[in-house]
Image: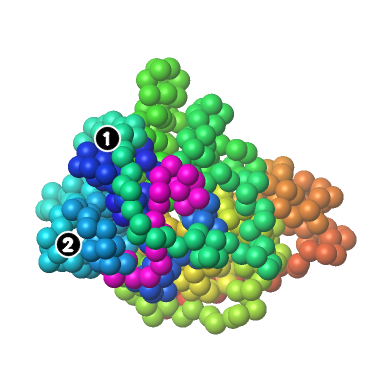
């Protein structure tokens, strides 16, 4: 059983099939070669270490480092395996990798079994009237919902682990976690990676946050979202289990949770949509879906990029988000949108620069969700926010963090700023001295962004 982004035992179709066929040898391969520039980033590696530790406690996990196809080839031969089981993945390099592995199995006379499980619906199952992938979210979501409730989640299979002397790398020897400096020291107080942590997070969400999710999910100063994204990304919990648990809660209190539960289900469908788009357009993480954006006049400004990364732009809602990201490996979705928009539109820096930073710093960094979301904000995605809609970071802050509680949590230097100036401290007679002045003026940046967009827009501005 080749574990990938499916680091769980429950509701695991590939593992269930393997367990039904005989003793199972669980394997995880750290492959930094096949993904090229998209090898796991720093925060992902921190999470992966913890998640593998949790999984190893459940079975004799064999760890190998190198190209997945080569490592599997060697292991299949040396362990005399009769079959290989794994979960399908949608990253741009995965189809070719999976085909190579199938070829290796075929020539060695080993059966090769690929299962779904990362998504609720396989890309081939959701097609429009002409048999094509959907490019727009709303009809996509409608087509998913028309298929009815996803299949029910299943408990962990009864598994006999294989006795083997295949040898395993030591997890510590992979040095996945930072040491000097240990920039991830704040993570363990916030997260519990692994299957048990995922279940606990789901239970907490149901108890404390689902009621009110539809409205509250936009408020970074409140705790309404599930924070399941890294668990879903690493497959520590299946989307079926999450979907179904929310459905059950809705059914248990008819009418009471409908709006919140439906909204939450629709967010899970954004995850599906991103993955289906990636399957269809493997260049999605690197290239704009709308080709006219290839000639967008991006700026090259290392100092501005650094200020954004360090949370020193002078716009509190942007800076609070970037500091939350650094401290916890996570940023609230509303703030991700504001911070991403600021990089792209106020600083005119390429969305790929922000995507790369998020890739390295998010614990939920996900090739599909990250690419789709950055392209959405940039206006160059399949179903994207129009480029000319430019967030005003002051108004966004005042609307979604009205008391400034979120900003004050992450920017202690603004602790004493009165609420009416918290999202624009430069307007105070005596602005806090230890906080940056805005690196761009909103009005000037807005005009500059619109002019840049006009230069590539065939239709012109509305
Ligand atoms: C610029 C930018 C980059 C992003 N990068 C990532 C990323 O690398 N990985 C990632 O998982 N999400 C990414 N997102 C989407 C979203 O911000 C996170 O999924 C969400 O904040 C996770 O928090 P949560 O689990 O509490 O979400 P909840 O609101 O509880 O949502 C439940 C689940 O639905 C899925 N989901 C929610 N919103 C989205 C969305 N917009 N797109 C796709 N799936 C979604 C996630 O799996 C999430 O765990 C990005 C958004 C933006 C604007």
- Residue 407 image position (x, y, % from top left): 70, 51
Which of these two is toward me, 182 or 294? 182
Residue position for label 2: 105
Residue at horizontal 64%, vertical 73%?
306
On screen, 84 above or below 251? Answer: below
Left or right placement of residue 95 versus residue 201 in this view = left
Q: Is residue 294 above or below residue 104?
A: below
Q: Are marks 1 and 2 in contact (CB under 8 Å)?
A: no
Outermost residue to the top: 253
Q: Is residue 247 visible?
A: yes
CA–CA distance in space, label 1 to label 2: 31 Å
Residue 314 position by quadrant? bottom right
Corner quadrant of residue 90: bottom left
Q: Which residues are magenta?
A: 52-70
Which of marks 2 and 1 precedes in the sequence? 2
Q: Is residue 392 magenta?
A: no
Residue pointed to by mark 1:
150
- Colour setup of the view: rainbow
Q: Which residue lies at the image location 53% right of the left edge and 51% below the top edge?
A: 50
- Residue 406, image x and y in percent? 68, 47
Q: Which residue is at 14% across, 64% downward?
A: 108
In the rendered image, residue 328, in percent from the top left (x then y), is placed at 62, 53
Other-residue count near label 2 (Cα within 10 Å), few / some / many at <14 / 14–19 / ≥20: many
Q: Nearer the viewer, residue 268 or 202?
A: 202
Which of label 1 and label 2 is nearer to you?
Answer: 2
Residue 56 included in the magenta stretch of the image: yes
Q: For numbered disc 1, what is the local secondary structure?
A: loop
């Amino acid at each position: 059983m080749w574990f990938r982004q499916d680091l769980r035992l429950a509701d695991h179709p590939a593992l269930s099939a393997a367990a039904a066929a005989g003793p199972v040898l669980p394997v995880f391969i750290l492959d930094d070669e096949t993904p090229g520039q998209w090898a796991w980033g720093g925060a992902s590696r921190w999470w992966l270490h913890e998640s593998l530790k949790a999984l190893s406690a459940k079975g004799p996990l064999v760890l190998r480092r190198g190209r997945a196809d080569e490592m599997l080839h060697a292991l299949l031969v040396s362990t005399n395996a009769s079959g290989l089981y794994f979960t399908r993945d949608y990253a741009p390099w995965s189809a070719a990798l999976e085909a190579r592995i199938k070829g290796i199995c075929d020539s060695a006379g080993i059966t090769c079994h690929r299962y779904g499980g990362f998504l609720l619906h396989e890309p081939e199952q959701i097609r429009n009237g002409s048999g094509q992938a959907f490019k727009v979210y709303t009809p996509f979501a409608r087509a998913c919902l028309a298929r009815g409730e996803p299949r029910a989640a299943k408990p962990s299979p009864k598994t006999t682990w294989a006795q083997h002397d295949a040898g395993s790398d030591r997890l510590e020897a992979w040095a996945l976690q930072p040491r000097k400096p240990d920039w991830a020291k704040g993570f363990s107080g916030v997260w519990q990676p692994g299957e048990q942590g995922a279940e606990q997070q789901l239970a907490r969400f149901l108890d404390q946050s689902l009621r009110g999710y539809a409205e509250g999910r936009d408020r970074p100063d409140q705790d309404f979202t599930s924070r399941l994204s890294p668990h879903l990304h690493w497959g520590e919990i299946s989307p079926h289990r999450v979907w179904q648990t929310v459905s059950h809660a809705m059914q248990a209190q008819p009418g009471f949770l409908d709006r919140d539960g439906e909204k939450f289900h629709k967010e899970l469908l954004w995850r599906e949509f991103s993955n289906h788009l990636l399957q269809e357009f493997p260049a999605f993480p690197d290239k704009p879906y709308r080709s006219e954006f290839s000639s967008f006049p991006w700026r090259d400004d290392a100092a501005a990029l650094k200020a954004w990364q360090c949370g020193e732009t002078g716009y509190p809602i942007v800076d609070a988000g970037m500091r939350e990201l650094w401290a916890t490996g996570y940023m609230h979705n509303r703030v991700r949108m504001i911070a991403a928009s600021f990089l792209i539109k106020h600083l005119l820096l390429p969305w790929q620069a922000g995507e790369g930073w998020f890739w390295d710093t998010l614990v939920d960094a996900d090739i599909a969700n990250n690419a789709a979301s950055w392209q959405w904000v940039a206006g160059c995605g399949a179903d994207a926010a129009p480029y000319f809609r430019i967030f005003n970071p002051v108004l966004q802050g005042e609307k979604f963090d009205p008391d400034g509680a979120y900003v004050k949590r992450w920017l202690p230097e603004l602790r004493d700023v009165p609420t009416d100036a918290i999202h624009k401290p430069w307007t105070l007679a005596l602005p806090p001295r230890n906080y940056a002045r805005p690196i761009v003026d909103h009005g000037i940046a807005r005009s500059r962004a619109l002019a840049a967009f006009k230069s590539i827009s065939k239709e012109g501005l509305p």
